[in-house]
């Protein structure tokens, strides 16, 4: 822990399991152990974060903008030197391929630089003298207070930092609990945090949510809950706060993004994009395509070619060259995916690909399920893993109605070529979700574009530009003409 609590800690140790190994069975292997903190440490970090925010002038929130930027620049310079170690942990802890782990690291560094630039611009634009009805005002954008930040296991660096970095640079102080899978990869960065920011600005806690995050919320001192993960955890944490009115929420939650494949779609392109969209990082992305709607006139060709392509995807350890599918970090996930498959099979679906559902201890080969209907769990649940439900439609209104009924509203992919059909559809789709991808898979980036969702998919907007606003508030100093 950056402020020194970890050094004193003598409590229980949480073991971290590597999700991968070079053995044939890809059996989980013990990778390391970390201390699991509890209520006492929770109280200490809350006190440290509150003190760094409130205790007097010259501290983090009142520090000159240029000095805060220097701290952040110092951090990112040191962070760059940890690339190979962090990438190694990304592969070991969460099973992300070498190429994608390197991308995650580089994208995060770029994110920090872009945030610094955007922050300078925001400060220039938002700091204004203005006058109305005899009242002079100095308007600025400033921090809100103490942020509890919880990142997801699928992007333990990039998405976590998409919360942390804007929260810190805006002048808030932060308590950060890394995801269960993805704790060790933060350790190479501890020194950079410690030497770049004043004491108490960034406080890292390890442990189970109920032992450490719960008492932090119960303290009543948290001003922003920033979480990328599931709605259940977000709601449970909010409920622990003694005054929920005080809480600002910055949440990235579940999604069930559909792809709609129209009769005139370029099938080669649609199939390739649906492979990437459904199975990149084994489907463990909130932006993954989680249900495919194929027009009935092209379904048999689409299904045959799509299933063959899925079976041809190479599976292996994350560091192996050209690997597309890798072991899953959550040990319960293969059994859960199998449940979804069995439920669909019982209710009339088939597995279209020969390898679909094959299992090892911590892997299950992607299963392409068809025909899927609304009685099946896989239609409703966010699978967040390697199983792909396919439905057909005759009238475009069918998928549109399903989207309107859905609890989610993040993105959609639309495949088709006739602009006269597509144009009016876009107008409808943008009111159902927040991003319409034309002839391409759903995705979050580039990070300058707004990343958000409707209904249960998000609260607030992430991305460089918007996150700075999500983690700040407009304030002003007023004086009257005499
Ligand atoms: O899990 C959700 C992530 O935001 C997905 O990000 O589209 O860049 O993979 P991505």
Image (cartoon, rainbow, N blue to C red):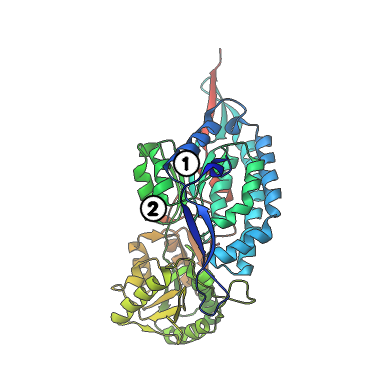
Q: Give the quadrant of the N terminus.
A: top right
Q: Position of residue 321 (x, y in %)?
A: 65, 76
Residue that appears at 42% across and 78% down: 294
In the displayed structure, 245 sits above or below 110; it is above
In-front residue for pair 429/223: 223
Q: Residues within 10 Å of mark 2 (few under 14, many from 20)?
A: some
**How far apart in space, not on screen, are marks 2 and 1 (Cα)?**
21 Å
Specify whether residue 429 is in view. yes
Residue that appears at 67% across and 40% down: 71
Q: Residue furthest front?
A: 10
Label 2 residue SS: helix
Q: Position of residue 477 (x, y in %)?
A: 54, 24
The quadrant where residue 43 appears: top left
In-front residue for pair 31/462: 31
Specify whether residue 418 is in view. no
In the displayed structure, 79 sits above or below 59; it is below
Q: Nearer the viewer, mark 2 or mark 1?
A: 1
Q: Residue furthest top?
A: 482
The quadrant where residue 407 appears: bottom left
Q: Which residue is mark 1?
A: 41
Q: Position of residue 257 (x, y in %)?
A: 44, 66
Left or right, residue 173 beside residue 72: left
Q: Which mark is residue 233?
A: 2
In-front residue for pair 419/464: 464
In-front residue for pair 42/69: 42
Label 1 residue SS: helix
Left or right, residue 170 beside residue 12: right
């Amino acid at each position: 822990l950056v402020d020194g609590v970890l050094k004193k800690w003598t409590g229980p140790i949480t073991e971290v399991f590597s999700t991968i190994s070079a053995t044939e069975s890809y059996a989980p292997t013990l990778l390391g152990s970390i201390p699991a903190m509890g209520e006492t440490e929770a109280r200490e970090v809350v006190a440290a974060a509150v003190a760094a925010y409130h205790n007097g002038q010259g501290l983090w929130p009142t520090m000159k903008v240029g000095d805060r930027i220097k701290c952040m620049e110092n951090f990112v310079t040191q962070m760059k030197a940890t690339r190979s170690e962090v990438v190694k942990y990304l592969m070991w802890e969460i099973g992300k391929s070498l190429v994608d782990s390197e991308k995650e690291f580089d994208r995060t560094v770029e994110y920090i630089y872009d945030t610094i630039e955007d922050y300078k611009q925001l400060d220039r634009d938002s700091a204004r003298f203005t006058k109305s009805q005899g009242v002079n005002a100095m308007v600025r954008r400033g921090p809100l207070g103490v942020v509890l930040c919880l990142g997801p296991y699928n992007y333990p660096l990039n998405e976590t930092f998409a919360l942390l970095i804007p929260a810190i640079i805006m002048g808030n102080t932060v308590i950060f609990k890394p995801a269960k899978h993805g704790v060790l990869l933060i350790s190479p960065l501890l020194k950079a945090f410690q030497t770049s920011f004043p004491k108490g600005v960034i406080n890292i806690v390890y442990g189970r949510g109920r032992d450490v995050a719960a008492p932090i919320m119960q303290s009543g001192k948290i001003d922003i809950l920033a979480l990328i993960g599931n709605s259940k955890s977000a709601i449970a944490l909010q409920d622990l706060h003694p005054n929920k009115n005080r809480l600002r929420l910055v949440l990235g939650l579940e999604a069930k993004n559909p792809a709609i494949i129209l009769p005139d779609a370029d099938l080669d392109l649609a199939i390739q994009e649906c492979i990437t969209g459904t199975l990149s990082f084994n489907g463990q992305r909130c932006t993954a395509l989680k249900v495919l709607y194929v027009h009935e006139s092209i379904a048999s060709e689409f299904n045959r070619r799509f299933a063959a392509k899925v079976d041809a995807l190479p599976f292996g350890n994350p560091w192996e060259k050209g690997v597309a599918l890798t072991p899953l970090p959550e040990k319960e996930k293969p059994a859960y995916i199998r449940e979804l498959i069995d439920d669909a099979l019982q209710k009339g679906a088939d597995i279209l690909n020969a390898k679909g559902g094959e299992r090892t201890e911590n892997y299950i080969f992607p299963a392409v399920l068809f025909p899927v209907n609304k009685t099946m769990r896989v239609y409703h649940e966010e699978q967040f893993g390697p199983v792909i439900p396919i439905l057909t439609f005759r009238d475009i209104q069918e998928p549109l109605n399903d989207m309107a009924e859905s609890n989610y509203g993040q993105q959609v992919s639309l495949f088709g070529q006739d602009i006269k059909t597509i144009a009016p559809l876009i107008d409808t789709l943008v009111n159902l979700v927040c991003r319409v991808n034309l002839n391409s898979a759903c995705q979050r980036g580039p990070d300058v574009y707004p990343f958000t969702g409707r209904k249960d998919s998000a609260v607030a907007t992430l991305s460089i530009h918007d996150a700075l606003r999500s983690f700040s508030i407009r304030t002003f100093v007023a004086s009257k003409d005499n």
